Image: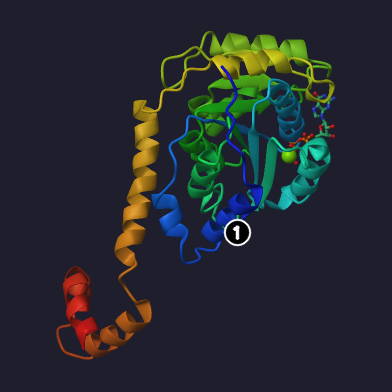
């Protein structure tokens, strides 16, 4: 597959991301006019320190070597044990920060509870339509973030490490449902062969939500071992945009977007005043108030 020749306007892209992050006037216009793109979105998730940034660094190397353009979004779900993550990303991927075919951006999750980032869908879509071949999203797997990443990514890579403790625990944590590819990193560590065999046995064989068998790959990210294999898998991966699983996740997101759209018309302060007035009258029923509020609001806004 030949690489695209689209010039990446990093400045405009960075400005667009800020626009979306801060919901500045014009961000909707931007999202409504996104160019179609066939970029593959790769989600990498795993425990803190599993080697996600090191793996991303190595994957960028593979991609850039064949003239692909790569964007990386590092999402820090601001968990207390992850303070050093953004710094880690910087160090691990330092080689690529100034490369013309690579764009790296760190996003703090700004208090979205357990989730990835409140605007990760929007930002990923903007990046995706900006001329890249691949968009990599790195995030620590801490509960909800895996589910979010699976909703966004075309390929979700779940990273495990031999010292990761009980495999069964890992499986229980919901990683099974989201994984398209398992990567056992730090395969240089003692016990990695055992870990691999146990995982294979447990999976034996496992299929992802689209019915594809889930490959289990061994890597040593810091030595760039196993990375060409992983890249091969990614490159050949057929994207099934509309698996039932994905539709479920997408519908959640779209539901939230519609809610936002509807709520936009409401002014909470104004509503408070109206409640004050309504509640002071006998027979106030808050359910009736809520039910009728939409219609009344339009009338009230007229005066
Ligand atoms: N022995 C060994 N160490 C590794 C390997 N890959 C990464 N490391 C080391 O593990 C540590 C964490 O690596 P990162 O790539 O920052 O891991 P991460 O998952 O991005 O970490 P967070 O973003 O903080 O969750 C670093 O000290 C790496 O050098 C590997 O294959 N083998
Ligand atoms: Mg990292």
* Position of residue 249 measured from the top left corner of the image (x, y, whole percent): 40, 38
Q: Position of residue 97 (x, y in %)?
A: 77, 42
Q: How many marks?
A: 1
Query: x, y (%) of residue 113?
Result: 54, 54
* The C terminus, quarter of image: bottom left
Does residue 165 lie above or below 22 as drawn? above
Rendered-image quarter of ligand 2: top right
Q: Secondary structure at mark 1?
A: loop
Q: Dot 1, how many residues are within 10 Å of its Cα: few (below 14), some (14-19), or many (20+)?
A: some
Residue 285 in sight from this viewpoint:
no
Front residue of 192/125: it is: 125
238 left or right of 95 in image: left
Q: Residue at x 57, y 28 (%)?
A: 4
Q: Nearer the viewer, residue 63 or 229?
A: 63
Tell me where residue 65 sits by quadrant. top right
Give me the residue at 41% from left, 23% from top.
Answer: 240
x 69%, y 20%: residue:
66
Residue 62's quadrant in the figure? top right
158 vs 57, left or right, is left
Look at 32% across and 65% down and name the residue there: 263
Can you see residue 8? yes
Give above or below for 299 relative to 74: below
Where is 104 relative to 222, above or below? below
Q: Quadrant of the N terminus?
A: top right
What is the quadrant of residue 279 in the picture?
A: bottom left
Where does label 1 land, which residue? 110
């Amino acid at each position: 597959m030949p690489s695209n020749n689209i010039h990446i306007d990093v400045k405009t892209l960075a400005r667009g991301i800020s626009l979306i992050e801060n919901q500045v006037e014009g961000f909707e216009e931007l999202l409504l006019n996104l160019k179609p793109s066939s970029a593959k979105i790769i989600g990498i998730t795993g425990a803190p320190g599993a080697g996600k940034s090191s793996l991303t660094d190595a994957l960028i190397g593979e991609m850039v070597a064949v003239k692909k353009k790569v964007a990386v979004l590092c999402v820090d779900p601001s968990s207390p044990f992850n303070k050093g993550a953004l710094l880690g990303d910087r160090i691990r991927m330092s080689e690529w920060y100034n490369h013309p075919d690579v764009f790296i951006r760190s996003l703090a999750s700004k208090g979205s509870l357990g989730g990835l980032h409140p605007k990760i869908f929007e930002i990923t879509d903007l990046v995706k339509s900006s001329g890249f071949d691949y968009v990599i999203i790195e995030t620590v797997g801490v509960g909800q973030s895996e589910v979010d990443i699976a909703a966004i990514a075309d390929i979700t890579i779940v990273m495990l490490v031999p010292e990761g403790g009980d495999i069964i625990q890992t499986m229980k944590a919901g990683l099974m449902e989201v994984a398209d590819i398992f990567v056992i990193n730090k395969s240089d560590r003692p016990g990695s062969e055992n870990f691999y065999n146990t995982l294979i046995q447990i999976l034996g064989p496992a299929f992802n939500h689209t019915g594809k068998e889930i490959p289990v790959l061994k890597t040593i990210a810091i030595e760039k071992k196993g990375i060409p294999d992983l890249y091969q898998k990614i490159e050949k991966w057929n994207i099934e945009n509309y698996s039932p699983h994905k539709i479920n996740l997408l519908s959640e997101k779209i539901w939230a977007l519609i809610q936002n759209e509807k709520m936009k018309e409401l002014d909470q302060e104004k509503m408070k005043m109206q409640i004050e007035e309504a509640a002071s009258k006998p027979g106030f029923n808050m359910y009736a108030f809520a039910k009728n509020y939409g219609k009344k609001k339009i009338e009230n806004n007229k005066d």
